[in-house]
Amino acid sequence: MDLKAIDALIAEHIMGLEVCAYYGFGGAPNDELVTVCRSSYPNNGYFKLPSYSTDIKIAWEIIEKLDYLWFEVGRENCCGVRYDCVIYNNPELEDKVIVTKSTASLAICLAALKIKGIEYES
């Protein structure tokens, strides 16, 4: 599973950032291609692509950004650790998306993409 590709999809489709790439950005070697984002906020500057799919603190920004009625993130220990992310899209709590993955941050990312109609195939 290409986690940087998932991060780029989240940045573009959920967080509203422009995703591009530069060689040698931020002190990286000149031959290293670095994925970066640009936003009109706060200063239209460039910054490294956030690690939404691997950092729960950063992934939580996705939940704050989306304005849906209900989120659930759960952890199960039965038959190995797994994390479920459930997003409900209506007041009756009937229209929902459920994603189960090995980490909470990845489950949040893939559920957010899915609720926006973007299916990521690994």
Image (tube, rainbow, N blue to C red):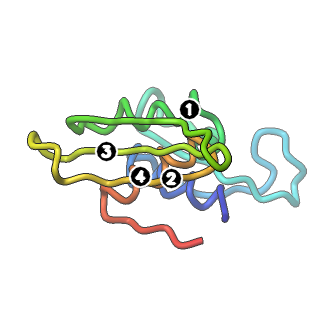
Q: Which residue is mark 4?
A: 111
Is residue 33 visible in this depiction of the protein?
Answer: yes
Q: Secondary structure at mark 2?
A: strand
Q: Nearer the viewer, mark 1 or mark 2?
A: 2
What is the quadrant of the N terminus in the image? bottom right
Residue 99 x, y percent position in the rendering = 44, 54
Spatial CA distance of label 3 from label 1 is 18 Å
Q: Which mark lies nearer to you, 4 or 2?
A: 2
Query: 55 and 33: which one is in front?
Result: 55
Which circle's residue, 4 or 1, is located before the other in the chain? 1
- Upstream in sequence: badge 3 or badge 4: 3
- What residue would you read off at disc 1? 58
Which residue position holds label 2?
A: 100
In the depicted structure, whether residue 31 falls above or below residue 51: below
Residue at 59% in and 32% down: 56
Circles 3 and 4, Cβ within 8 Å, touching? The answer is yes
The image quarter in which residue 45 lies: top right
Q: What amino acid is labelled 4 in the image? A: Ala
